[in-house]
Amino acid sequence: MNDLLVDADSCVKCGLCLPHCPTYTKTRNENESPRGRIALIQAWAGKHLETSEKLIEHIDNCLLCRSCERVCPAVVPYGRLINNFRGQIKDKKKSSLAESLLKEVSHNKAANRLAQSSLSFYQSSGLQKTARFFKLLELLKLDKVDRLLPPQSDQAPLQSNYFTEISPARGNVGLFIGCMGSLLDHETVNSAVKVLTAAGFNVYLPEQQTCCGALDMHDGDIEAAKHLATINCDAFSENNVDAIVTIASGCGSQMREYQQTEFAGKVVDISQFLIKSGSNFTDQLTPLTAAVCLHTPCSLKNIMREEQGALKLLQQVPGIKITALPASIQCCGSAGSYMLEHPQMAQALLNDLLDVALEDQSQYLVSSNIGCALHISAGLRERGIGLEVIHPVTLIARQLK
Ligand code: SF4
Ligand code: SF4
């Protein structure tokens, strides 16, 4: 309670964060703004406000995009405040079936492997089409998960405990692939290894690595998140890695805030790592005459603060035309499991993004976070548009000669 009050009291109520908040922009309701949410928590922690469904709803509606934190002149630790509040009221909340499934697949390797083979059967056998036709998924409340599934990929996952050995190497890096990367995006994992080795780095993928803990932390299960952090720190403690490179900024932003500061200090987005290490691929890349729309995830911009890496990396491709989405486009609405629990707000924010992204008739939309990529891809499919959404390193890997 004390920590909550100290953090909430640091807000000077200036309101500078309001225009940057997606939920406030959409609702114009002060309770759906950063300043309003801080005031609610302040009143609750000071025992002036009872716990109520309405209070929990206003805090739950926050995307934790942390745009407010980035612009706050008083440096209010907004993310910590919300996570701690959710930790205090977690017994009052029930997880949906979709959220529970997501956590199980994220935390449990056997469940993740089972999900991989089941998904393959579900998509290739025609079961997905039948279930969609008869609206069975809506009955089971799994339609929000189903819409996110990308078409089946022909890329095979890497073997566990993978370690490249090139000589001479510029250094050793650990690759954090995240639970969704290992389940749904083998091409980005394979591309990351290809690009990092092309840049001269040995790449280490420890089998023991697990979910980053973001789902638990945002759900108020702080102990579970800490447990996962410990597993990841142990997993990357061997092989003397110089950096722990992430291909999903949602995971990277969570790991950047681990209490294990030595580990946290090594976490870096893959594009940023390649640029910072002076890797230049221009002479190794086939030209690409294509227009690319660049999406910058909130986690990359507001928490990792490494938004320049992807742009600079993509600029190395000869012939490419890159257009970044304007600053007026706020969070895409994916926000971890937010898109499953708050589909209306998630869809409204996605619609704003797609309307602008589609103006340029790009051939690719590039995003550094798998959660955003899945949500945006689903929106494009629903509009019947075949624009491909890929990770920046996937685009680089495809152009490597
Ligand atoms: S969170 Fe920061 S920007 Fe927003 S009202 Fe409080 S002090 Fe001002
Ligand atoms: S984290 Fe994002 S959604 Fe939540 S209050 Fe801040 S700006 Fe608004």
Image: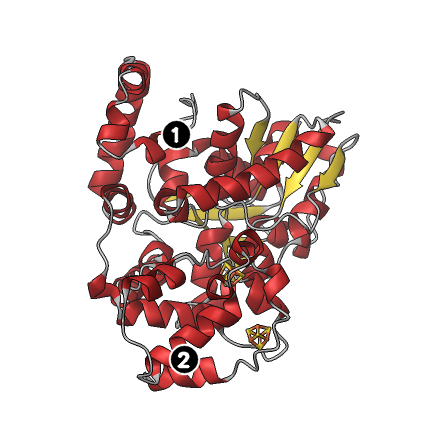
Q: Quadrant of residue 354?
A: top right
Instruction: Name which of mark 1 and mark 2 comes first in the sequence.
Output: 2
Toward the viewer: 187 or 162? Answer: 187
**Measured from the top left, where is residue 229 in percent x and y?**
33, 63
Q: Residue at x 39, y 72 (%)?
A: 259
Q: Residue at x 32, y 31 (%)?
A: 143
Question: In this rendering, is residue 268 above or below 103?
Answer: below
Disc 2 within 8 angstroms of ligand 1 (CB): no
Three-letter code, disc 2:
Gln
- Mark 1 is surrounded, within 10 Å at the Cα level, by few (under 14), some (14 to 19) or many (20 or more) other residues, namely some
Residue 240 visible at all: no
- Mark 2 is surrounded, within 10 Å at the Cα level, by few (under 14), some (14 to 19) or many (20 or more) other residues, namely many
In this figure, which residue is indicated by the disc labeled 2? 42
**Measured from the top left, where is residue 83 in percent x and y?**
37, 67
Looking at the image, the residue that sits furthest to the right is 319
Toward the viewer: 274 or 19? Answer: 19
Q: Secondary structure at mark 2?
A: helix
Q: Is residue 219 left or right of residue 165?
A: left
Three-letter code, disc 1:
Arg
**Measured from the top left, where is residue 284 in percent x and y?**
71, 33
Toward the viewer: 232 or 82? Answer: 82
Q: CA distance from mark 1 to mark 2?
A: 38 Å
Question: In this rendering, is residue 112 above or below 44?
Answer: above
In this figure, which residue is indicated by the disc labeled 1? 147
Q: Residue at x 46, y 44 (%)?
A: 346
**Measured from the top left, where is residue 25 in percent x and y?**
58, 55
Colouring used for the render: secondary structure
Give the quadrant of the N terminus. Answer: bottom left
